[in-house]
Image (tube, rainbow, N blue to C red):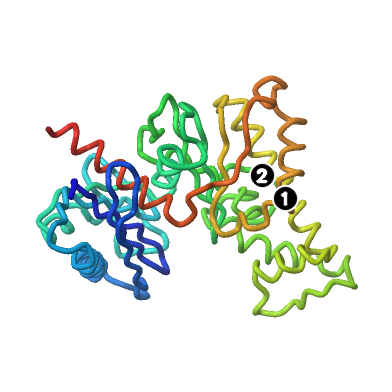
Amino acid sequence: MKNLILAADLGGTNLRMSAVDGDGSILQRVRRKTPGHSGANEIVELIYSAAQECKEKLGSPASIAGIAVAVPGTVDVSRGIVLDAPNVRSLSGFNITRAVSKALSLPCFLENDANAAAIGENRFGASVGAMTSICVTLGTGVGGGVIIDGKILRGIDGTAGEIGHVCVEPTGAKCGCGSIGCLEQYASATALVRMAREMKDDFPETSLVDDELLTSLEIFEAGTRGDELALQVFKKQGFYLGIAFAGLVNVLNPEVLVIGGGASAGWDLFIEEARSIVHQRSYPEPGERARIVRAERGDDAGVLGAAAVAFENLLKLT
């Protein structure tokens, strides 16, 4: 069996571990719950346990060349340190590559989860062949990854690509980052719920019940049934995505903008508005040229991107 990478995509809720080959084929998968309020050492033990299970599923011929870990937070990939991880606080300041490498006796490589998703889609998904692409993930928050000339854009401090914290409404909702009117407050799953509650009084005929259990899935399902409140919520999501994308088109001139994540399920309900706003607010030629497409690799994008990073780094070491 050819060399494989064990790639872990660590989220605040779940850990996905996959065995990936150099062609982007996933040979085995393991999924574990991320325990609440886990310490850094518990996270390392979780990764170790999932890796061991993945190796056992592969069988004795497996040749593991390394392990890659994608983390939801700001990372210093050169030192292997998680600088800040809001959803897994115990990892902030932790050298995760050193700890995981020691536990598994394998070289370990670190990546930000949104960057990993962008790389995964660029190498094996919706933006294959594009030298300049942007990937936006719509989930509980909004993540982003930017690829310029085939390389992930990190910035001087490793924080580039925080598209979810681009301001799209200067007098808008307060964001968890401390700013106001961030895209995350208008395009994430949690934003859909908040906007539905704020707009509900204007739509007395809505089927949506405003209670503590209201979810973005319920809003999506209502939208597919033609519920006017839900449709207006998704139109608003598309409007603000369009504002952010138009700015990205004008600044970065991308070939492709990829939209993924769980909250992209409402694609058919928001994409027309998003594209319309991009065309209105961007320079005509780059705005027309830039394709806005749906992500193709789903939950696999992160592990595929992390694996690609590991393979590329291992190649540099040979």
**In this rendering, position of residue 22 left or right of residue 259:** left
Q: How many residues crowd mark 1 within 10 Å: few (<14), some (14–19), many (20+)? A: many
Q: Residue at x 65, y 79 (%)?
A: 213
| Of pointers 1 and 2, the one earlier in the residue sequence | 2
Name the spot of residue 149 as percent of width and height, x first: 42, 24
Q: Quadrant of the C terminus?
A: top left
Q: Residue at x 27, y 70 (%)?
A: 39
Figure check: 164 above or below 153:
below
Figure check: 138 above or below 251:
below
Q: Nearer the viewer, residue 189 or 81?
A: 189
Name the spot of residue 255 as percent of width and height, x first: 56, 28
Figure check: 251 above or below 209:
above
Q: Residue at x 76, y 44 (%)?
A: 273
Question: Mark on residue 128?
Answer: none
Q: Which residue is mark 1?
A: 270
Secondary structure state at the residue bearing disc 2 = helix
Secondary structure state at the residue bearing disc 1 = helix
Name the spot of residue 226 as percent of width and height, x first: 83, 63
Please, what is the three-letter code of the amino acid marked with disc 1? Phe
- Tag 1 near tag 2, CB within 8 Å: yes
Please, what is the three-letter code of the amino acid marked with disc 2? Leu
**In this rendering, position of residue 149 left or right of residue 266:** left
Name the spot of residue 253 as percent of width and height, x first: 57, 24
Q: Nearer the viewer, residue 163 or 231?
A: 231
Q: How many residues crowd mark 2 within 10 Å: few (<14), some (14–19), many (20+)? A: many
**In this rendering, position of residue 300 left or right of residue 251:** left
Q: Which residue is mark 2?
A: 241
